Image (tube, rainbow, N blue to C red):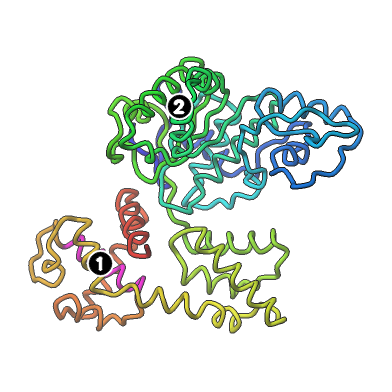
Amino acid sequence: MRALSPHDGGLIGGTGCAVPFGNRIAELAGQPSIPKPGSSFELHAAARAPRAAHPPAAPASSPGQAALAAQAQASGVLVGNPAGGPGATPPVVDRTRLRPDLAFESFVTGKANQMARAAALQVVERPGTYNPLFLYGGVGLGKTHLMHAVGNAYIERSANARVRYIHAQEYFDEMVRSIQRKNSEDLKQYYQSLDLLLIDDIQFLSGKPRTQEEFFYTFDALYAARKQIIITCDTYPKEISGLEERLISRFDSGLIVAIEPPELEMRVAILLKKAETQGSALPEDVAFFIAKHLRSNVRELEGALLRVVAFAGFRDKPISLDLAKEALEDLLALNRRQISVEFIQKAVADFFKIKVAEMYSKRRHAHIVLPRQIAMYLAKELTQKSLPEIGEAFGGRDHTTVLHAMRKIAEQRQHDPDLNHQIHVLEQTLRG
């Protein structure tokens, strides 16, 4: 099945479950948050939080705590007072590994991720509709956040849901330990008993045939039982090297959704939302300044925001545009130093498998012209060079040629999902 990008239309879904994009998914994409059942999110969040070194004495038991204990026994959440004392309950091994702060409510939605969010919401409402749900994209774009949001929503809707989030490398480590301890059958039974399996960065199973075999059997068992599987990766399934063809075939049978780097408006919204969550007053002009200069992923934005907030605290001053420029001076200078027109030309040439010399040659073959125009577009977007300077770097071309290339690529990427994805990949590559 082909990948679904944020700009796609038509039908999505696995065999026998196609859904008109313009109806259900578009409707879900506009919903502010997942409907909440009557159970308490705060109780589940407290249950999934890391254990304190010296936990406080537990309060008297209540019906809500009893429901939480029942859920914990089913899904493996650590609850109760391990230290003993009044109201203590036996500790249960923490197996969900969910982060309660990663919920749909805190997930900022934009064009880059609205289809992924909509599919995730549909999975919560109708498990098995898209199975597996395969989310792919670069680092720091929200794939892990969405996985945790689905897991938290599952437990909100059903206290007895058996949920497990795990990174692929940790899954491999578990398999190795179970073989060493001769209890691999127990681990296999545990995974095959889940209602929801969330496995992050599946590319880490590349080159690990024994673990891939075990995951294949787990996948088939859960799929046959109509239990939900969500997988993330940094690339499209067919592009994962070192992965068995039968696994790739299983991934292709579900819904594959791309998450792109956030556009400018979305980056601003992410910064404002994060600042609000932290209780920091972030002026919109400062959010725009940060978003305009840092484009690759959400983690980079959050790191820049943290630096600005900390800088303001150290100086005991309110956050302002001048303060933000000073706080981020070295970071922005580093970005400018790292990205040069020559670096862009080489990266684009390598990506499209042409010679770097073609970037400044006079040849006008179609397979050369498009990469050259993309390189011009990126040179203007990612460097401080003027149009004449960029034209000079591309074989002494006139600045109007660069301007034409910029406008053409900017327009094409709005209507061509494949081209838009290629440019996003190049942007991430160039920004490291």
Could you tell whether 152 is left or right of 266 in the image? Answer: right
The residue that mark 2 highlights is: 180
Q: Is residue 361 magenta?
A: no
Q: Position of residue 35 (x, y in %)?
A: 69, 36
Could you tell whether 395 is left or right of 431 in the image? Answer: left
Name above or below for residue 404 compared with residue 28.
below
Whichever of callouts 1 and 2 sits on the residue coming sooner in the sequence is 2
Q: Position of residue 311 (x, y in %)?
A: 63, 77
Name above or below for residue 64 compared with residue 352.
above
Q: Position of residue 337 (x, y in %)?
A: 35, 77
Kind of element beneath mark 1:
helix
Residue 226 visible within the image: no
Could you tell whether 125 is left or right of 380 in the image? Answer: right
Nearest-to-viewer mark from 1 and 2: 2
Q: Which mark is residue 375?
A: 1
Q: Residues within 10 Å of mark 2 (few under 14, many from 20)?
A: few
Q: Which mark is residue 147?
A: none
Between residue 39 and residue 15, name the one nearer to us.
Answer: 39
Q: Residue at x 35, y 61 (%)?
A: 427
Residue range of the region highlighted in magenta in the rendering:
369-382
Kind of element beneath mark 2:
helix
